Image (cartoon, rainbow, N blue to C red):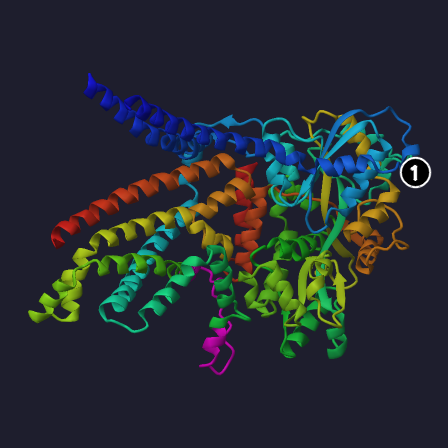
């Protein structure tokens, strides 16, 4: 009897302990299994018939495993699925593994920390910052390779890039794949109906805003919750315009040079925001709302102008009212007759420094930076790609074609990809917010931001 | 001999319950806390595969960071506001629904409990709409009494925006503590109240001298629980409603931790903020327990 009880007690404890351990075990398994969840997709694409691109691949045979990490956001994953399938077909001996999804940046984080990253990474979405990855030594230095790298068609890759790669201390680590632009939108239909003139420079922007305000509509709304929209569309182009269209000032700012922030061009740009504020053009609701709310108010014609990116029509496609016609200009802060300044917003691709199959990763770069992919990207993702190429005959949406036109126009100053230090970026966003609600002056903006810059230098 | 085996058996039986729990607690609570403390001694981006040991530098920096102090201030503001607001309203409702014999008591009890069933995320979004300056309920309601349309930006003041987070937080908390107090009040023998009213004590006197002393344990638990959940969990409502903005005016420690660790890539610094949250929670718990134990003695 006593023995029985003893065994029962031992049994209970053993079961409970087993449950505990099983809990640990299964959670571990899950973690290591998640990347391979996309394996079926990879094998599926392997069986796809070889496309004509296969013939172009006359280099060494690629073998082994090759893993691609891509974030799935506003641009979707159609292009990635297609291009990976094509690449797999062209390299049948290579085992291509795709790790993609909207949460992939978080899911893959332990592997980057553990020194076991995927070979190839698309840097987009929350949780990945190219400047930080470079500082952390996670990305392969591509400077030398890119100098004479040719794509599968035999073109020099640097020749077919619409915007060059960003340099970190003179070195290249990542290549822009998507080329989008910040700017200011309005509703052409509403402007026509009310007889307002579409803005071409700062003075005309102020003039028409006066009329709009008199007409009972608030001229300008932005998202104060995410102030990088107003910084990207208004402040940075304004700084470049005030700096004689020389965008190197922004690159100096990104390189944490204090003098750049203290330049009169920065103050001049900030004073343009102050002008909008003091004339009462900025919708008071802006400070507390997120981007979606600001976009909804804009689509309801409650506000006439909105700073945003070219993805806006795509993002809001379900909510666009009948007859709404997007007007767009990359910048409104230039002097009359001055050049338009387009601040680009890019997403880049890179190779992991600790990747195991860098050869395949480089071959993949040569594969995707080809002319054929320019229109394929535009069609499948609804955004202009960073590859030069005529997309006018493709099935890409019209606003994408318009944007591509703007970005290749010789009268547009195109600001290349610039990533600021995350602390400085946050300081600029907070300061701009504070400026728009009259909490600080432009001089205080500069003081605040330079204090942070000095700290992170 | 026989008693020795019995004792051993008893111990095995107890251990079979304690050890698994202890293991769970160790793996999922103690270990992460120690790990967090360990990371707080490093300068680490949270992504890199190498970390630099910096000793107590993160903590030193923390004391010179004005946003940390504002976050701590906001946290304690929310604690104080929620304790006073939730306890006052929850006690009022609990007494009203038990002592005054409403017909609709059950109905009201369910109504007041509803916010507790809703996720905090939904509450945040809901109140964002209430506070929306253009299409919000609050401005629309106020506009009924004014000539011009009211356009107050409730979540966009230059300072003190944190005040606006108090109503949703209180509204969301009342139900649970009300139920807790109702249960406690119902367990008080009715004879006490009968005796008191025979002696000529009014409702107020009965509330002060019978109800409060006899539900003091529940009040104490409620206050401690509000304090702890606020210090550790105010992150959610702040992040949903303002993300700590505008210009960091609604930052609490939890949101600043997230901002630093995952948005600005200072994981070590974030870990040190987390450790400060733990220390402050412990200290506040001890202080509150001391304070309220003292009052219990006085009451009884």
Visible residue check, residue B184:
yes
Q: Position of residue A102 (x, y in %)?
A: 65, 45
Q: What residue is rendered at 70% in x and 54% in y?
A: A237
Quadrant housing the N terminus of chain A: top left
Examine the structure image and report whether residue A141 is included in the region drawn in magenta: no
SS class, disc 1: loop
Q: Chain letter for mark 1, please.
A: A
What secondary structure characterizes most of the magenta part?
loop
In this view, the residue in front, B97 or A306, is: B97
Quadrant housing the C terminus of chain A: top right
- Asked whether, in this view, residue A313 is left or right of residue B31, the answer is right
The residue under label 1 is: A52
In this view, the residue in front, A406 or B201, is: B201
Q: Residues within 10 Å of mark 1 (few under 14, many from 20)?
A: few
Q: Position of residue B147 (x, y in %)?
A: 49, 83
Magenta segment range? B139-165
Q: What residue is rendered at 68% in x and 33% in y?
A: A169
């Amino acid at each position: 009897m006593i023995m029985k009880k003893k065994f029962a007690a031992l049994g209970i404890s053993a079961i409970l302990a087993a449950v505990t351990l099983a809990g640990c075990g299964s959670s571990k398994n899950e973690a290591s299994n998640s990347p391979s969840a996309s394996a079926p997709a990879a094998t599926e694409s392997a069986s796809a018939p070889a496309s004509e691109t296969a013939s172009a691949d006359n280099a060494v045979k690629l073998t082994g495993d090759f893993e691609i990490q891509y974030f799935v956001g506003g641009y979707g994953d159609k292009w990635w699925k297609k291009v990976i399938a094509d690449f797999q077909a062209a390299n049948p001996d290579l085992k291509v593994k795709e790790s993609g999804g909207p949460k992939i940046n978080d899911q893959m984080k332990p592997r980057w920390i553990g020194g076991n990253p995927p070979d190839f990474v698309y840097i987009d979405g929350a949780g990945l910052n190219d400047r930080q990855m470079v500082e952390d030594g996670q990305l392969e230095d591509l400077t030398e390779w890119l100098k004479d790298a040719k794509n599968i068609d035999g073109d020099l890759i640097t020749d077919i890039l619409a915007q060059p790669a960003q340099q970190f201390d003179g070195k290249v680590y990542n290549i822009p794949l998507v080329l989008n632009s910040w700017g200011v939108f309005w509703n052409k239909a509403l402007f026509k109906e009310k007889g307002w003139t579409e803005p071409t420079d700062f003075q005309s922007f102020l003039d028409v805003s006066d009329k709009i305000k008199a007409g009972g509509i608030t001229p300008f709304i932005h998202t104060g919750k995410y102030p990088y929209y107003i910084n990207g569309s208004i402040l940075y182009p304004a700084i470049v315009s005030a700096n004689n269209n020389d965008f190197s000032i922004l690159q100096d700012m990104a390189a944490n040079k204090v003098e750049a922030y203290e330049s009169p061009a920065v103050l001049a740009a900030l004073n343009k925001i102050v002008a909008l504020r003091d004339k009462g053009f900025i919708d008071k609701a802006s400070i507390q709302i997120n981007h979606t709310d600001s976009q909804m108010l804009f689509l309801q014609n409650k506000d006439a102008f909105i700073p945003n990116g070219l993805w806006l029509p795509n993002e809001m496609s379900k909510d666009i009212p009948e007859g709404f016609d997007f007007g767009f200009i990359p910048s409104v802060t230039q002097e009359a007759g001055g050049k338009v300044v387009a601040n680009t917003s890019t997403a880049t691709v890179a190779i992991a420094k600790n990747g195991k199959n860098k050869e395949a990763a480089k071959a993949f770069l040569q594969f995707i930076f080809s002319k054929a992919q320019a229109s394929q990207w535009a069609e499948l993702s609804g955004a202009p790609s960073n590859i030069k190429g005529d997309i006018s005959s493709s099935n890409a949406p019209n606003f994408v074609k318009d944007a591509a036109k703007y970005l290749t126009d010789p009268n547009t100053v195109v600001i290349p990809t610039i990533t600021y230090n995350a602390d400085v970026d946050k300081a600029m966003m907070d300061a701009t917010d504070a400026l728009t609600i009259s909490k600080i002056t432009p001089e205080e903006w500069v003081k605040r931001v330079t204090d942070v810059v000095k700290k992170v230098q | 001999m026989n008693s020795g085996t019995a004792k051993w058996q008893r111990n095995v039986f107890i251990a079979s319950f304690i050890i698994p729990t202890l293991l769970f607690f160790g793996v999922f609570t103690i270990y992460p806390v120690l790990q967090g403390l360990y990371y707080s001694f490093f300068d680490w981006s949270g992504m890199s595969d190498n970390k630099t040991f910096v000793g107590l530098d993160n903590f030193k920096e923390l004391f010179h960071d004005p946003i940390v102090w504002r976050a701590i201030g906001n946290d304690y503001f929310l604690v104080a506001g929620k304790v006073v607001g939730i306890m006052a309203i929850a006690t009022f409702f609990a007494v009203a629904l038990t002592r005054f014999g409403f017909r609709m008591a059950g109905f009201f009890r369910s109504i007041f409990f509803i916010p507790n069933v809703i996720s905090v995320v939904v509450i945040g979004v809901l109140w964002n709409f209430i506070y929306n300056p253009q299409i919000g309920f609050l401005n629309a309601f106020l506009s009924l009494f004014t000539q011009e349309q009211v356009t107050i930006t409730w979540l966009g003041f230059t300072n003190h925006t944190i005040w606006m987070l108090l109503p949703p937080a209180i509204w969301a908390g009342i139900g649970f503590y009300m139920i807790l107090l109702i249960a406690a009040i119902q367990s008080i023998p009715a004879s006490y109240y009968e005796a008191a009213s025979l002696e000529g004590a009014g409702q107020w006197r009965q509330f002060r001298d019978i109800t409060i002393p006899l539900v003091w344990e529940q009040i104490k638990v409620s206050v401690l629980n509000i304090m702890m959940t606020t210090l550790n969990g105010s992150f959610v409502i702040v992040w949903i409603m303002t993300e700590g903005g505008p210009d960091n005016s609604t930052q609490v420690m939890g949101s600043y931790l997230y901002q630093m660790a995952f948005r600005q890539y200072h994981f070590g610094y974030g870990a040190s903020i987390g450790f400060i949250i733990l220390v402050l929670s412990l200290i506040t718990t001890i202080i509150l327990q001391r304070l309220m134990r003292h009052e219990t003695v006085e009451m009884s």
